[in-house]
Image (cartoon, rainbow, N blue to C red):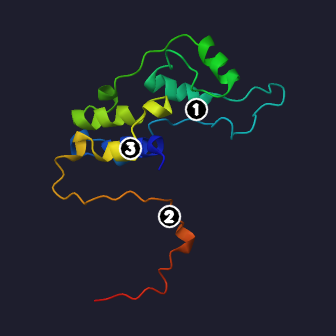
Amino acid sequence: IDVWSFACIFAELLTMLPEARVDRRDRGALFPGRSCLPLSPVEDDANPEPNLDQLNVIFSVLGTPQGPLGWIELPEMRDYLHSLSPLPPTPLAELYPAAPAAALELLEAMLRFEPFKRLTVEQALEHRFFESMTYRLDTKIAVRPVDAATIDFEHAEVSR
């Protein structure tokens, strides 16, 4: 499971808290960029550099990555990040003022740049944010990925 993607969805859910008082038309993505490197095509043939808009949107919220960047595989990306002026993170409490402190702590831990420092699914499920849930299932993490194409719902017997 992609914990970063879940964090982005979780952030949107925080805007739906009644305490947030955010009109449904004003809700939006945590990182509403216009492109995604390396998937977005080059927009201008005269300028073959990729559009880094999505990275800039992420940096405007999380700040620029600091410290050793050896975990980034592409040397060009490391060079690009080193060339940037440091940008401080925006406190998540400013973006989600109605969110409980535990929710913001969980969100921050799921949005760490370095993948090996990011929470795993198991760690996220054990986070204190979920302790107060009145109904909590015994969660079991799949040993191997589930292939949705092999699940046959059409022919399963349903008991009443």
Q: Nearer the viewer, residue 20 or 49?
A: 49
Give how far apart the Cα atoms at labels 2 and 3 are. 26 Å
Q: Position of residue 73 (x, y in %)?
A: 64, 28
Q: Position of residue 2 (x, y in %)?
A: 48, 46
Q: Which disc, if any, is residue 146?
A: 2
Give the residue type that dot 2 points to: Val
Q: Of the residues under marks 2 and 1, which one precedes in the sequence?
A: 1
Circle 3 residue? 12
Identify the residue shown where x is 70% and y is 22%. 76
What secondary structure is marked by label 2?
Answer: loop
For discs 2 and 3, the disc positioned in front in the rendered view:
2
Neighbour tally class for label 3: few under 14, some 14-19, many 20 plus, Cα within 10 Å: some
What secondary structure is marked by label 3? helix
**Is residue 87 rendered to the left or right of residue 105?**
right
- Residue 16: image x %, image y %? 30, 47
Looking at the rendered structure, the secondary structure element under dot 1 is: helix
